[in-house]
Amino acid sequence: MKGLVCLLLLSGTLCLSYISRSMEDSVRMRSVNSRSMEDSVRMRSVNSRSMEDSVRMRSVNSRSMEDSLRMNRSMEDSLRMRSVNSRSMEDSVRMSQQLRSEDGRQNPPQADTSRTEALTDSTQYCHLFFTDIHAALRELTATVTEQRVDIRELTTTVTEQRVNIRALETRLRDAEKADEQQTFILEELNKKHDEISSLGEVTSSQVEELRKENRDREIAFSASLLQSGSGSIGPSTTDITLVYRNVFTNIGNAYNPVTGIFTAPLKGVYVFKFSVYAHGNKPNLASAHIIKNEQYVVMAHAQQSQGTLNSSKGVVLILEVGDVVFVRLWPSSRIEDNENNHNTFSGYMLFPLR
């Protein structure tokens, strides 16, 4: 029974060792997955930051372009004011020319003509300049509109990246919690494995001690009456202690084939059996007892006028160390034996007692 317990403990140790190794492999795989997820989160965070920087740069460019537009518009307003002033100057020149044409033909017309030409050139230049500024303003407005659309798209992408990063961070936290739980379970399994290993060592030593004790407790014998040939014993006027000389088994050497006496080496429960055999071709009696310390215990008895006499008995006895058991032939009894070993005496220890 204890050997079976030892085998169960050893098999439990092997199972726990296998589970511990598989748990360690699972923890390693989870750690690798966790690191890859951390790298993915870092890469996405870097990409998100770069995209945010790009959005900021585009926003700065858009603001600078808007400032440029504002500057161009202010320049346009200034040019319009100058155009208005130029037109007022032209009107005043025309008025002065009319007055001068009416009053004085005395003044030379060359100066007035040069002044008029100058005013005409400045007016044409102002119109050309306004045309170029309007075209540049339209281009800047279209570019700003495109930049705003790109900024909206980049902002949407950054928002999606942030959502993905939060989801990855949540999965990473869950994976870290799972890793902590797996590590805790692995530590507990290692503790159990160490406990069972130490218990297995103790059990192994106990099993070895039990084996030694069992070797000491391995007691059994079996013998027949005559060592060889055929013959008979009895009848006699007194009891005869039968000596079974043909020993089949004598484990523990507790049976003495010289005296025919079994001496208990250990306290325990013992089983004994014996048989008697004879021929009844004339008035005959075959009767014998098992004796424990000179105390009659059981009898095997057979009697008839002809034919074969045969009888056997068995008994279970509690013996102390040094108790003796043997078989004694009854007075006036006669038994016979030959190479078929009809008369036998056997015994063994069933289990020890403390």
Image: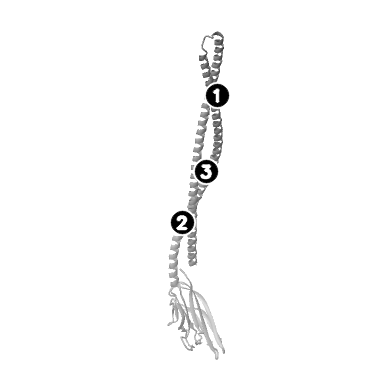
Q: Secondary structure at mark 2?
A: helix
The colour scheme used here is one colour
The total of numbered circles placed on residues is 3
Identify which residue is drawn at 46% across, 56% down: 190
Dot 2 amino acid type = Asn
Front-most of 298 and 34?
34
| Quarter-of-image position of residue 130 | top right
Front-most of 122 and 236?
122
**Quick one: label 2 or label 1, which is nearer the N terminus?**
1
**Quick one: label 3 or label 1, which is nearer the N terminus?**
1
In this view, the residue farthest toward the bottom is 282
Q: Find residue 259 and report its horizontal and vertical position in percent.
A: 43, 82
Dot 3 amino acid type = Ile
**Can you see residue 249?**
yes
Q: CA distance from mark 2 to mark 1?
A: 92 Å
On residue 165, which mark appears?
Answer: 3
- For residue 54, above or below residue 228: above
Q: Do the residues bearing badges 3 and 1 touch, measured as CB atoms within 8 Å?
A: no
> Within 10 Å of the Cα at label 3, are there few (<14), some (14-19), or many (20+) other Cα atoms?
some
> Within 10 Å of the Cα at label 2, are there few (<14), some (14-19), or many (20+) other Cα atoms?
some
Q: Is residue 323 left or right of residue 141?
A: left
On residue 162, which mark appears?
Answer: none
The quadrant of the rendering that contains the C terminus is: bottom left
On residue 190, which mark appears?
Answer: 2
Q: Which residue is mark 1?
A: 127
Give the label, 3 or 1, closer to the camera: 1
